[in-house]
Image (spheres, coloured by chain):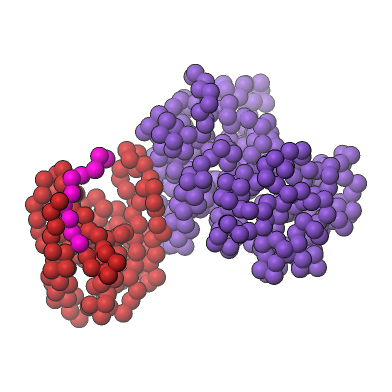
Amino acid sequence: MKPEFGRNPQLNRSGELHHLLSIEGLPRAIVERILATADGFINVAEREVKNVPLLRGRSVFNLFFENSTRTRTTFEIAARRLSADVFNLDITRSSTAKGESLLDTINNLTAMQADMFVVRHAAGGAPYLIARHVAPHVHVINAGDGRHAHPTQGLLDMYTIRHYKRDFSRLTVAIVGDILHSRVARSDIHALTTLGVPEVRAVGPLTLLPEGLESMGVRVFTRLDEGIRGADVIIMLRLQNERMRGALLPSAQEYFRNYGLTPERLQLAKPDAIVMHPGPMNRGVEIDSRVADGAQSVILPQVTFGIAVRMAVLSIAASSQRIQ
Amino acid sequence: MLELDAEAVYRSLAARLREEVVGRDIRLVGVHTGGVWLAQRLKRDLHVSHDVGILDISFYRDDFSRSGLNPSVRPSSIAFDVEGSDIVLVDDVLYTGRTVRAAMNELFDYGRPARIDLAVLIDRGGRELPIAPTVVGRRIEVPDEISVVLSRDDDGRLHLTLEQRREA
C-alpha cells in the first residue's frame, strides 16, 4: 500500500471514520457522532434482548499483544451485542512468541476473513502499522498502544462527562496522576480540547508530568489541592506499580499522602464534581476507598458506558467500508 | 413540488384507526421521525393512556453494508412492557416494507407482543416484502424517483410533499 502523506490515516476519502487510532486529529463532528450513536446503544442494553443485528456475519478479532482482561472483555461484549463473530487471540502466548512478525500475524488473520482488528500493543504506533498494512475493507481499532493513545477510553470518558455535565463549554477538568506514562491522559486531553473544554488541568509530581503539556492547552499543577480546586470533573489515573520500583517515586505511601484523592480533598472541588478512574484502581495509592465508593464516584457507570461507546465505534467504523 | 392535504389524510387515518381499535387496550409505537409525530397525535385524539413508544430502526436496517449507519441515530425508547401487549405500529409512508420489517424485528427484541397492527399515513405501493397495513390514511401511486415527505411546522401542522428523490 502506498503511504499517503498529509491524509489522516483514520479517515477514508470521504472523511468518514475508517480506523480509530487516536483522538488526536479526529474532527469534532466525528467525536460528537460517536457519543450520540452511543446514546442509542445505552437503551439497547436495558432491553430483554441486548443484541442488535448490525454486524451480523462480520468477524472481529481481538488482538491483545499486551494483557488487559477488562478492555478485551468490554470490546468482546460490544462486538457480540452487535451480533459480530468475535475471536480472541492471546498473542502474548502464541505465534509472536515463536518469532512470527507482527505483519505476518496480520496476514494470516486476514486470510481467515477478518473484517476488523481490535489491537492492544505495548509499542506506541503498532495499530498505525497494522492499519497501513491491512486490506482496504478491514478496520483497525486501537485498544491502547504503549504510552501513545487509548481512544475508546478517551471517548467513554467524554460520554461519561457529557452524561453528568451535559455541556462541555464551561467545565474545568483535572487529570491527576502519572500523566507521563498514561495513554488515557493523552487521549482524554485531546478529546477534551476537541470538545471545547475551556480548562484542562494536569496534576502530578514533576517526575510524572511530560513536557509540552502547555502547548496542548493544558494547565499544569504539581500540588493536588490547587489542581482540583473548583474542578467539575476529576479523572484519577492508575499509578502503575512498576513506577514505584524505579526512581520516579519514593513510595506508595508517600504518593498517597501527596496525590491520593481523599474525601477531605475532594471537598476542594465543586460540590457536584464527579470522580472518574479508568481502572483498575489501586485503593489507598491514588484513591481513597471512601471516594472510590462514594456518592461522587462514577467509576462503575464508566464501565457500562464503555460498552455502548465501543459499540458506536465498531458500527461507525464498519459502516465506512463502501468508500475507499 | 406537489403538496397533499396532510391534515385531511391524517383525519381519515385517525378515524379508521379509531374504528379498528374499539374496545382494545392499544400501545402506539412510532417509527422515527414522522411515525412518532403521528403516534403522538393519535395518542391525544384516540385518548390512549400509555406513553408512545419510539423506535429508531437504524440498528436493524438490512442495507447496513451498502449504505452504512444512519448518521443521526436517536435512541429507541419503549416505556411499557412489550410482552403480551397490543401494539399499533405507526409510520408516515409505507413503501418497500423494509422499515416495517426492521421495526418488527426490533420490537421483538423488547418482548413478544400479543398483536401488532400497522397504521400508515400514506401507502405508496412498491412493496418488496409481504407486508400489508391494517389502516391507511390514503393510497397513492407515485413513480420511483419521487419521494413522499412528511414534515411538521412550528404550529404542529403536518405537511406532505412529493419531492424529486435525492441521490442515494
Q: Which chain is purple?
A: A
**Residue at position x 73%, y 49% in the image:** A219
Q: Is residue A173 left or right of residue A116?
A: right
Quarter the C terminus of chain A occupies: top left
The number of callouts visible is: 0
Q: Quadrant of residue A24?
A: top right
Above or below, B50 relative to B62: below
B67 and B158: which one is in front? B158
Residue name at image x 32 percent, y 48 percent: B61
Query: Which residue occupies 34% across, 67% down?
Result: B53
Q: Is residue A120 above or below residue A100?
A: below
Q: Position of residue A70 (x, y in %)?
A: 63, 48
B51 horizontally vs A235: left or right = left
Which residue is nearer to you in this view: A145 or B140? B140
What's the magenta bit mostly, secondary-structure-wise? strand
Classify residue A190 as left or right of residue A270: left
Residue B92 percent across, percent down from the top left: 22, 60
Q: Is residue B59 visible?
A: no
> Where's residue A5, x and y in %?
53, 23
The image shows residue B67, relative to residue A307, as above or below, that is above
Q: Is residue B46 above or below residue A45?
A: below
Q: Quadrant of residue A292?
A: bottom right
Observer-nearest of B124 and B114: B124
Q: Is residue B72 visible?
A: yes
Q: Is residue A253 magenta?
A: no
| Chain B drawing hue | red
Q: Position of residue B157 (x, y in %)?
A: 23, 68
Q: Which residues are magenta?
A: B159-168
Residue at 53% x, 40% y: name it.
A26
Left or right for B155, reference A259: left
Residue B108: quadrant of the picture: bottom left
Magenta stretch contains residue B166: yes
